Amino acid sequence: MSKLCVSITEPDAAAVISAMKSLPPQVDIAEIRLDSMAGDYPRIKRELEIICRNRDRPVIVTKRPLEKCGHAAARDDQKRLMLLKDAADMGAEYVDIELESLPQLSLADLSARTIVSYHNFEETPEDLELIYRQCHYSGADVIKIATMATDISDSSRMLGLMQKHSGASTPLTALCMGEEGLPTRVLAPKFRGYLSFASMTPEKNSAPGQIPWRDMLDLYRFKQIDKNTCIYGVAANPVAHSMSPAIHNRAFAHSNVNATYLPMKVKDPITFLDAFQRLGLKGLSVTIPHKEAMIPLMDEIDDIVERVGALNTVNITDGRRFGYNTDVAAALGALRSALEAKNAAELKDCRVLLLGAGGAGRALAFGLADSVKELIIANRTISRAQKLASEAGAKACGLSEMEACRPDIIINTTSVGMHPDTERSPAPKKMLSRRPLVFDAVYNPIQTRLLRDAREAGCVTASGFDWFVAQAAEQFRIWTGKQPPREIMADVVREKLDAFV
């Protein structure tokens, strides 16, 4: 089983010990970064002795040189290496020494287990196997290879290296730094990596891309990941803001699904899909900018994807890729539920005014065109509304003309009213006097100015929050075949939005 190690970068022994003892038992090892401590050799040695005497779990002791993301000056290199020998003599379980430093310090002189490490903060070299062999032939007790990922495909190569040597006699820790390297940190247990490194907090990374230990344990369920864990994720660029990992990982945990869901910063969907499918990828949420580019990579797509020209869900079964669009069904479901609450006419008998002709507007236009009495698309740039209306079999108008439409349903798919510009509304209040059903696709904030105005006018409303949760729930059903825990998923979205505000 992979061990979880937390890097501690505190400036003195007291702070290191306090940080270490605040960690839960699920954190197996603490990495003590001596290069974070100021002072001369005697002072740091005294601090190290206090740490080793008061540790509450196994420790890795390292002191990185400047060029390896440390704080130790090059002129201190001899004393830097002396501190590693001191750590071994003081009973530290592991010392970490860089591959290039081995000529200056014999592993035979160290009584602790030795981690021989290779670091590259610029790239992930092509020949990872050569680097592995160099570390292996050094006589290390543990091999560590850490490189910078410039593309998520670098992570797939590193995971492949880990997988290839998972049964070797010398344990291997192989990871990629940076945002694109996140899969290597979370998936170490699936590929039998020896260690994965986490930070104390987001602000106290000892290397780019480290994940806080709380997220490793609670969000990604690191300790529950094994060789049978299925891999899911959201493919996007950018991706760091996505709430989907929190939503789906909570749903997996609640439903006892052996799976983990990762944010995946994808630049090239072709190389990404090919590489991660070989590693066991089972499904994806897909968002900007890949909703259209993913379609040719599918073996099959559903009718909605065919009509809309965009997918948001991929399911991989028996090596075949299936593309779906859960946005449309989720939106129609939210509308029908709201109509039932209003005791109003059925959707097929309604005149609908759709505001916006972007990605969300396009999806809803094709979904609604055959489901409503009349669909009118209004957009700031009227030529875009006219083009979409022509394709979907609808009518078009400019924003200045929309008040004359007298719709039964108003749907906003523009960004007007989205955080932080929360006091704007895309529809004037007088349009609400006839009490149409109002659906706002914006979900941050949950209650937009448009929805507040609509409720004050006595309108029944549906929010982007309902849509967002519904499309995620349908993704869960497609992937797992299980009934989605909608309330659990909704609670996660509320938590995230509350924290965001």
Image (cartoon, rainbow, N blue to C red):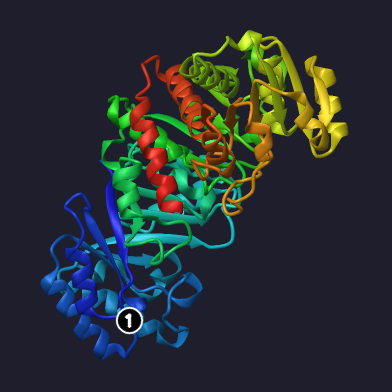
Q: Residue at x 48, y 18 (%)?
A: 337
Residue 259 x, y percent position in the rendering: 36, 29
Q: Is residue 413 left or right of residue 181?
A: right
Q: Is residue 226 left or right of residue 288?
A: left
All told, the count of numbered labels is 1
Q: Quadrant of residue 261?
A: top left
Write the residue at 52% across / 28% down: 462
Quadrant containing the N terminus is top left
Element type at marker 1?
A: loop
Q: Which residue is mark 1?
A: 37
Residue 421 % position (x, y): 61, 53
Q: Is residue 21 or residue 368 the one in the foreground?
A: 368
Can you see residue 292?
no
Residue 69 appears in view: yes
Residue 60 vertical position relative to residue 286 in the rendered view, above or below? below
Residue 484 rendering spot, x and y as whole percentages: 38, 21
| In the foreground, 450 or 229 | 450
Please give the name of the residue rendered at 63% of the width and 15% of the height, measured from the top-left corner. Answer: 299
Between 119 and 367, the residue placed more toward the observer is: 367
